[in-house]
Image: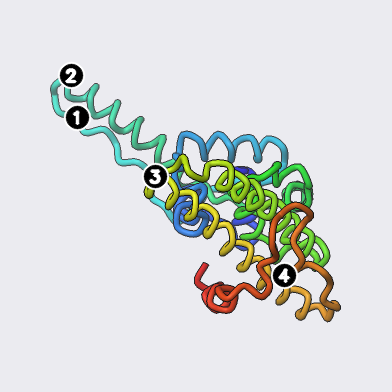
Amino acid sequence: MLELAILGLLEGQAMHGYEIRKRLRDELGQLSNVSFGSLYPALSRLERSGAVRATEDQGRSTAAPVPMTGSLSGERAALRARRSGAGIGRRSRKVYEITDEGRRQFAELLHSEQASGNDDARNFSLRLAFARYLPPHARLRLLERRRGQLFQRLAEARAATVAAEGRLDTYARSLMEHTTESTERDIAWLDRLIEAERARNGATPTAAAVPLAGAGPALVGNPTMHTVLEEGDTK
């Protein structure tokens, strides 16, 4: 996931390491906890594989010389500080840019059916963030596959609620209802995205709005559907 996110960000522009981390945290919430301890090894792996190229930013100044204080312990401390600071400086001066090989790897990761996992919201969200780089049919397949996964989850949640009827107190039942309603909202949001994708590419609407077998009653016609669709842009 991290390599996919890095390559996707670099596809737009070259960046310093700290800029990549900021974009990961600000724009890709599922990777908001990525540390420099994870980011720089990932960048090194990508650099070794030829996916990214690192160049020095000549606009940054070099480290200041160690002051001669006359104190051996003080000079040693200053030298350690300079080495530590220089290490950070050298790393922050690197500008990373994607290569043709990196674009090939990015496309391979983005198109991979396995990258979405069985029902992994984080992987789906990451791939959706870079869906503009997918061809129309692949974007539609990504959305419809996720929608099918959510219908399966909805069917399981409804079955669990029925099976637990009479054994749940008010709070436990409310939690299960919340899970079901959240899944319904996600499906409605995906329905809207799928409809827009089909309209954008001139595709004829199909039975995408019909739930999978065993998923329970369709959401189409549900009194809450229109309200949910109107809120889809805020998802």
Work out whether mark 3 precedes mark 1 in sequence or the reverse, and give the earlier one. Answer: 1
Q: CA distance from mark 3 to mark 1?
A: 73 Å
Give the residue displayed 55% in from the left and 34% down from the top: 41
Q: SS for tag 3?
A: loop
Q: Position of residue 59 (x, y in %)?
A: 45, 56
Which residue is the site of mark 4?
194
Which residue is the site of mark 2?
73
For the residues bearing labels 4 and 2, Cβ distance under 8 angstroms: no
Quadrant in the picture for the N terminus: top right
At label 4, which amino acid type do we have?
Ile
Nearest the eye: 131 or 225: 225
- The crowd level at tag 1 (other Cα within 10 Å; few <14, some 14-19, many 20+) is few
Which residue is the site of mark 3?
169
For the residues bearing labels 3 and 1, Cβ distance under 8 angstroms: no
- The crowd level at tag 2 (other Cα within 10 Å; few <14, some 14-19, many 20+) is few
Work out whether mark 2 precedes mark 3 in sequence or the reverse, and give the earlier one. Answer: 2
Q: CA distance from mark 2 to mark 3?
A: 67 Å
Q: CA distance from mark 3 to mark 4?
A: 38 Å
Q: Which mark is residue 220?
A: none
Q: Is residue 168 above or below residue 185?
A: above
At label 3, which amino acid type do we have?
Asp
- The total number of labels drawn is 4
Q: Which mark is residue 68?
A: 1
